Amino acid sequence: MQIHPLKLMLSPTFARCSSNLKPYFLKTKPFSSSSLDFSPWSGLQSWRESPLNKNRFWGPKGPQTPPSSIDTNGTSLLDSASSLAELGALVLSTSDPLSKSKLSHLAFSKWRNEKLPVGVYDPPSRPARPPKPELVSPKEIPAPKDSGMPLNVYMLHNLAHVELNAIDLAWDTVVRFSPFSEILEEGFFADFAHVADDESRHFAWCSQRLDELGFRYGDMPAHNLLWRECEKSSDDVAARLAVIPLVQEARGLDAGPRLVQKLVGFGDNMTSKIVARIADEEVAHVAVGVYWFVSVCQKMGRAPCSTFKDLLREYNVELKGPFNYSARDEAGIPRDWYDKSSTNKQDEVTKPNTPEKLSVVYERLASIIAMETENASLNKPAG
């Protein structure tokens, strides 16, 4: 079977032996933009050009800069780093959650302020993790009633776990595909480093709120499905874009409003406001994924819609609603990519008697809404 040169070139295993493919790759003729049915998020350029966001503390009126200057512990660790990829690898190699969050922001700030190159660096085989939370199988995660936590804290802890993993997912994308910066363009790495900075701010808000409620991240077990599933797309940038921002982050758009309502109903208005802001900021992350997925498809000379569906079949990912159409439309995901009712019959994927494959790893905030039934849903066959 012939493998497309782009997939070879974007595979780390071919990182240093595929230069001979570049001339072939550059001759690939992209299809016309009129055939894409793709409208980028209107705020994408403003997000890219926005100043560094230092509002890593959640005050009485919302996000603000910390009451005291941000802890700069760890800056010495970054002093010798000479590229964005090396900075990202340092973040990935940091185990303490709050240190990882702070270092992520400092790394993005250093790269922006000093205008460092993307560079090339090998990522660690997996991100460094703290002793707690203990990582267990999904079946071993306690139900809310058995966790010793109020439901709002239980959901917030799981959201914090998602956000911590999201920091690593974004930096791994930067570092893992750094050998191909000439092909992917510097903007690709700038965008995902920016995403990592956003995710680190989200984790800081979650961690702060947990502390205010009398708990800490790590007070209950968590699973490692998020990273384990991410590893499947480690050799294919198109797959990474499809399964992380276009599925995982897009589920946050679907679930955010429902989670907010659940927290309001519980009586925790402060946490609901934090979650609402996080969900709102996910639009940028999904938009980044759409933009670069379309760009990669253009370079391969393939239609984004059919390529997206092919990748989901290959990686056994099933899309499932309800969908937040307005938020997805805003982020720029064409409906016929993910909604069967918007596609022709020949484009629909039907697999009778097949178990549902969409793991909690691709649920983002949706997984948290249904957390109280997560153990059952993970093993429930399609009905």
Image: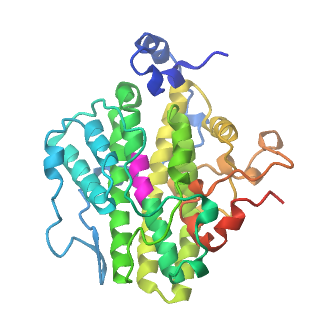
Q: Which residue is at a point 41% across and 58% down the rendered structure image?
A: 164
Above or below residue 362? Residue 59 is: below
Q: Is residue 206 left or right of residue 336?
A: left
Residue 104 image position (x, y, % from top left): 28, 53
Q: How is the image coloured?
A: rainbow
Whether residue 182 appears in magenta in the rendering, the answer is no
In the orientation shown, which residue stands out farthest toward the bottom? 267
The foreground one among 264 and 342 is 264
Q: How many marks do you count on the picture?
A: 0
> Which quadrant, please, contains the N terminus?
top right
Specify whether residue 207 is in view.
Answer: yes
The residue lying at 55 percent from left, 56 percent from top is 250
Residue 10 placed where, x, y %? Answer: 47, 27
Asked if residue 177 lies left or right of residue 353, the reply is left
Q: Main secondary structure of the magenta part?
A: helix
Could you say which quadrant of the image residue 301 lies in? top right
Q: Is residue 71 above or below residue 146?
A: above
Residue 329 visible from this viewpoint: no
Residue 151, above or below 32 = below
Give the residues drawn in magenta, as a range.
164-170
Q: Residue at x 84, y 60 (%)?
A: 383
Q: Is residue 306 left or right of residue 255?
A: right
Q: Residue at x 49, y 12 (%)?
A: 24
Q: Is residue 11 left or right of residue 82?
A: right
Q: Residue 328: horizontal and vertical position, in percent? A: 57, 57
